[in-house]
Image (spheres, rainbow, N blue to C red):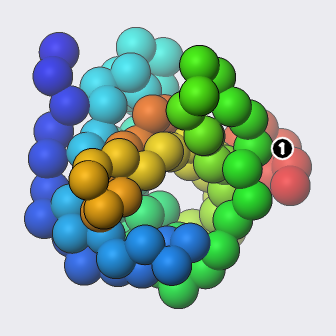
Amino acid sequence: MKPVRYKFKITVNNHSISEVLISRHYLEKHSSYMNDEIILQLVTALDGHNFPVDSITNGVEYFVADIELGKSEKTYRIIWLFEGEKMEVLGVVNAYRRKGNKK
């Protein structure tokens, strides 16, 4: 399945993001509770923040953040990368709920 594109205006790691691509990978194991709406809430929570590189694979830098959402403050993990000529695209690789609200 192809990633879904959303127009978006946020700044993450000093990159002016204009588009978010959400990989369909999360549907394989996390579709019972995860959806694009929750992922876009997680992306919104990244706005204005800087994150260190979590890992590098084949020259691609991956970033990770754990974010609490909702009244029950469930903790979600979002994994993303930056792409595009000006790093204006935030590509969500995966997102899922952390068990036991671990941070």
Position of 37 relative to 28 (above/below): below
Q: Which residue is mark 1?
A: 100
- Where residue 15 sits, quadrant-wise, is bottom left
Q: Residue at x 15, y 56 (%)?
A: 6
Position of 16 relative to 90 (above/below): below
| Res 87 visible | yes
| Res 37 visible | no
Q: Residue at x 47, y 62 (%)?
A: 42
The quarter in which the C terminus is drawn is bottom right
Residue 1 horizontal/vertical position (percent):
17, 15
Position of 34 relative to 63 (above/below): above
- Where residue 34 sits, quadrant-wise, is top left
In the rendered structure, the answer to whether residue 89 lies left or right of residue 68 reads: left
- Where residue 40 sits, quadrant-wise, is bottom left
50, 6: nearer the viewer: 50
In the rendered structure, the answer to whether residue 90 lies left or right of residue 85 reads: right
Residue 50 horizontal/vertical position (percent):
65, 74
Circle 1: residue type: Gly
In the rendered structure, the answer to whether residue 67 lies left or right of residue 101 reads: left
State how many labels appear.
Answer: 1
Give the SS element for disc 1. Answer: helix
Q: Residue at x 75, y 59 (%)?
A: 52
Residue 78 horizontal/vertical position (percent):
56, 47
Mark 1: give few (<14), some (14-19) or many (20+) Cα within 10 Å. few
Residue farthest toward the bottom in the current orientation of the protein: 48
Residue 35 horizontal/vertical position (percent):
32, 42
